[in-house]
Image (cartoon, rainbow, N blue to C red):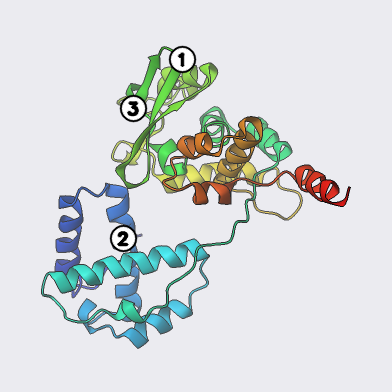
Amino acid sequence: MRKKTPASWAPTLEAYALHMAAAGLPPTTIRLRCKHLERIAREIGRAGPWTITADQLVSWAGQQNWATETRRSYRSSCMKFWRWGIASGLTDTNPVEEWPRIPGAAANPRPAPDRVYRAALAAADPRTRIMLRLAAECGLRRAEVAQVHIRDLVEDFDGWVLIVHGKGGKDRRLPIPDDIAALIRAGARGHSPHDHTPSRGWLFPGQDHGHLSAAHVGVLCSRALAKVQTSGQVWTMHKLRHRFATTAYRATRDIRAVQEALGHSSVATTQIYTAVDRMEVRAAVASAAA
């Protein structure tokens, strides 16, 4: 059940959501930022957003056991919200200024091993199998997988292309293998012939604007991967995206092409996803010692 947001925040969050929509931010970004702020409202700001002090916010953030990127995301959501509040004349202070900047996570790619991926494919049902393949063989994020629609599949001179709806409302044209294109063309009935839920063209129909939510897609893939985990390591859908990045780079040595495929705005981000071939490191050391 959805946790209730304090009434003292409701008008402000509604106005902020409209502001973000007017700025053209995608619904996924608006929902994420509001989700972050709603949690803060429940835990430290029940009297209203403009009552929160810098000490309260920094102390609360310091108590959270977050991954680096989650921490950066929360800080970003708060910074943008309080800057909007100042620009709108709702407050004249920004407590987020006292929240220390968080450096980006060090490169630590964890691509799912081929053994794990192949076993997960074998264990998964047909619907989840397609989700796994879109992540591992095409590099899609879970939110991008959730939003695959048959109208986004087009054929150009070189073959099939999928229009991927990426982060920040940015679409990209991604070449895909013929067999995966065939699975998309078959639609929801192709993987779930006995499910008569109206698909309206979505590959994975659901209750989130007609398709499954990104979170649910992630859960389904995590369950399939959990069935084959034996080493105590946790493999997730995002690790399949790391697998794609690593495999694609080793095959092409073209980091820019991998960047385009993943939908990254920076090559530096792509480098976080690509694992270095240990044999190449060994060869580099050997050449220096020769």
Q: Residue at x 42, y 73 (%)?
A: 101
Image: 228 above or below 99? above
User: Which label lies toward us, 3 or 2?
Assistant: 2
The residue at the point 33 percent across, 73 percent down is 40
Q: Which mark is residue 199?
A: 3
Q: Could you say which is closer to the camera, residue 93 or residue 260?
A: 260
Q: Residues within 10 Å of mark 2 (few under 14, many from 20)?
A: many
The location of residue 190, given as percent across then percent down, is 46, 19
Q: Which one is earlier in the sequence, the residue at label 3 or at label 2?
A: 2
Q: Marks 3/2: CA distance?
A: 29 Å
Q: Gap in Å between the C-alphas at discs 1 and 3?
A: 26 Å
When the figure is inspected, residue 78 is found, relative to residue 281, above or below; the finding is below
Query: Which mark is in front, 1 or 3?
Result: 1
Determine contact: label 3, label 2, CB under 8 Å: no
Three-letter amino acid code of the residue under disc 3: Ser
Quarter of the picture containing the N terminus is bottom left
Which of pointers 1 and 3 lies earlier in the amino acid sequence? 1
Could you say which is closer to the camera, residue 169 or residue 232? 169
Q: Position of residue 125 (x, y in %)?
A: 57, 31
Query: In this orientation, which residue lies closer to the viewer: 138 or 157?
Result: 157
Residue labelled with disc 2: 33
- Tell me the CA gap for discs 1 and 2: 38 Å
Viewer-nearest of discs 1 and 2: 1
Q: Please report contact status of discs 1 and 3: CB closer than 8 Å, yes or no.
A: no
- Relative vertical location of residue 232 with respect to residue 66 in this rendering, above or below: above
**Mark carried by residue 159:** 1
**Residue drawn at (55%, 42%) of the image:** 241
Give the mark nearer the N terminus: 1 vs 2: 2
